[in-house]
Amino acid sequence: AFGNYVPEFRSKTGKALFIVYSVIYVGVVYVGMLTSEVVNVLMVLDDLQKVTEASFLTLTHLVQVSKFYYLYKYNKRVRKLVRAINRKEFQPKNQKQYVKLKSYVQTSKAITRYFLWACVVTCTFWSLYPLTVKGELFLPLAGWFPFDTSHSPVFEAVYVYQAVGSLLNGLSNISVDTLMSATLPQHYNYLHRPGNSNVNNLIVIAGAGMMKPPFDVKEMVTLNLRVLNFFGYIAPESGPDAYFVVRSTVFLGLLYLGTLASEIVNMVLVAGDIEKMTEASFLTLTNLVEICKVYAVIKHRRRLNNLLESINREQFQPRSLVQVQTLTDYVYWSKLTSKVFLSACVATCTFWAVYPYVDEGDLRLPLAAWFPFATKASPGFEIAYLYQFIGSTVNGLVNVSLDTFMSGLIMVVCAQLNILNDSLRNLRLYAKDELKGEGMIVGELMTEQLQAKMDEKLVECVVHHRFIIEFANELTFLFTTSILGQFIVSVVIICITLFEITLLPLMSIKFISLILYQFCMLLEIFLLCYYGNEVIRESTELTQFAYCSDWMDCSSGFKRNLIYFMTRSQMALKLYAGGFFTLSLETFMKAKAATAFIGCLFNALCFFRS
């Protein structure tokens, strides 16, 4: 009812109404209260009592984010799960089963009602508490608002907002919890019905563990592609439509190019002032290097589409459950990395947006930039403020998506080398599994059929290796300049942010935002270097795993072909940045050393100028 669970709509009107109240609840009530509570906690970090008072509800709302996220992400699967509860196989088969099911239903409803009423009572006490305390009135819950809440009618409006918001958030949170808990006794009941009627139920439940169709290796970069497609940077597979052109014009043309032009003009205007140039340059450099990435994506879009289509080619598919698990792990870590970066980007931009309101002194824009109109008075300030907040968030999400997209493609190479190593090591085992005992003779280890199958498997490994090399070469061609630019700019930005941090008070809003920004910059080049190093490591192990393929009683032709492959695999596969250096952990350590050196020079320059 609160917009977390998306129902199946029978009419467009119902869908429109759902979207409206979903935006009101999730956007205005939940996100608004969470933002108010998080900012309040950050502002009272030095007061243990106030932090304790504010944190209990803030933590509840923070963990609620994960529940909402999974309800939205897996909404179709949740609906499917709910519909499956009433399937034919789950119906009671006799009176005893009917009574037992009815008992579980009544217990589940009673628990849900108890929790909902407890939530209503708790929120009611919170709302009444300020009215029962003598002295000056105060809000029921600790929270930050960008205006004075001590006077009427603002106090009353915020009071109602907190009372209604806490009640709705509580009811929604409890409903999600009781929904999860209600499914547990349901499955318990299916497996513990009286009578001999569990066969069909076990078959249905076990069906969830069956093998799925061909593995979608492209899932490693699907999240990044969705973000880039939404903001108009990468067209969908069906080609650009009118809606995509509009999104591209707004996000790429108006927000990105407009923000970049504003920052470059500002840099020219403050040239000579080291402190102002330092303050303005870190985001300007980030947006400048984004040009290389956007250029590569747009100019070589056909080659990029071909590269993406090749990810799910037949040779890249897993050949065993072990390889399926390997690819699943890579997909998981790729998605997790992207989500962490996107979340850090949103958090950083939010801190930038909040900073002008919590900083002492006159209001100023979150970021240094030039505008062709006065931004110190209303409504110019509000327009520029909103433009900077939306622009920095969108550009940050796009930049992060491009970086994690590149690292995701490198992870594809790592994953394929990993499963190729597994195929080489278990060459004979997989050949026997495919034969399923055909042509095998008792007392003989090698037969003609097994030898022929092993020859076939070795050829498959050679072809797989060739496709991996082709994929890596195409990846290098498309993004080598972007990776080089990212390295150079990241090193400079880390130095600049370190200098900026030394000028800020500890644990201030801007201090935290710059720490998050530096974390993103450092981790971006680390990801590229780490997975580039994994490519080198996995490729150097090909020779070793080929040698372990149980070849001793094979034919001379097989041994000769195996030697050819081992000779070729001794050349480690490496990814390069601009053709100057390899992506490896050694390169990352050198980049860190260069960062420290440039930082010392920068501090020395600022010292002599002062």
Image: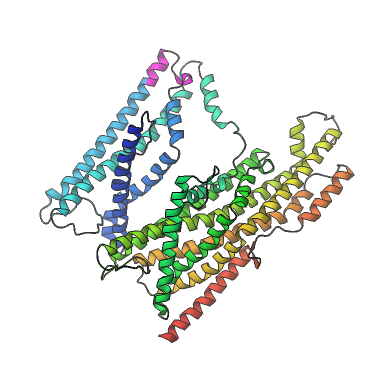
Q: Is residue 133 magenta?
A: no
**Residue drawn at (66%, 66%), measured in percent from left and top?**
579
**Residue drawn at (18%, 57%), measured in percent from left and top?**
149
Q: Quadrant of the C terminus?
A: bottom left
Residue 441, compared with residue 378, is above or below; it is: above
Residue 408 at x, y = what percent? 57, 52
**Residue drawn at (60%, 48%), measured in percent from left and top?**
305
Residue 70, compared with residue 468, is above or below; it is: above
Instruction: Work out which residue is located at the far front of the displayed protein and give it.
Output: 242
Residue 271 at x, y = what percent? 42, 78
Q: For residue 113, what is the image quadrant?
A: top left
Q: On the picture, is 540 further left or further right than 534? A: right
Residue 211, compared with residue 261, is above or below; it is: above
Residue 389 at x, y = what percent? 36, 59
Q: Magenta stretch: give its range.
A: 87-101
Q: Quadrant of the N terminus?
A: top left
Q: On the picture, is 144 further left or further right than 449? A: left
Q: On the picture, is 299 further left or further right than 565? A: left
Number of numbered discs overlaid on the protein picture: 0
Residue 424 appears anywhere in the view:
no
Residue 89 appears anywhere in the view:
yes
Residue 118 at x, y = what percent? 25, 37
Q: Main secondary structure of the magenta part?
A: helix
Instruction: Work out which residue is located at the far top of the displayed protein and give it.
Output: 95
Tell me, what colour scheme is on the image? rainbow
Q: Is residue 98 magenta?
A: yes
Q: Nearer the viewer, residue 327 or 385?
A: 385
Instruction: Work out which residue is located at the far left of the displayed protein and give it.
Output: 134
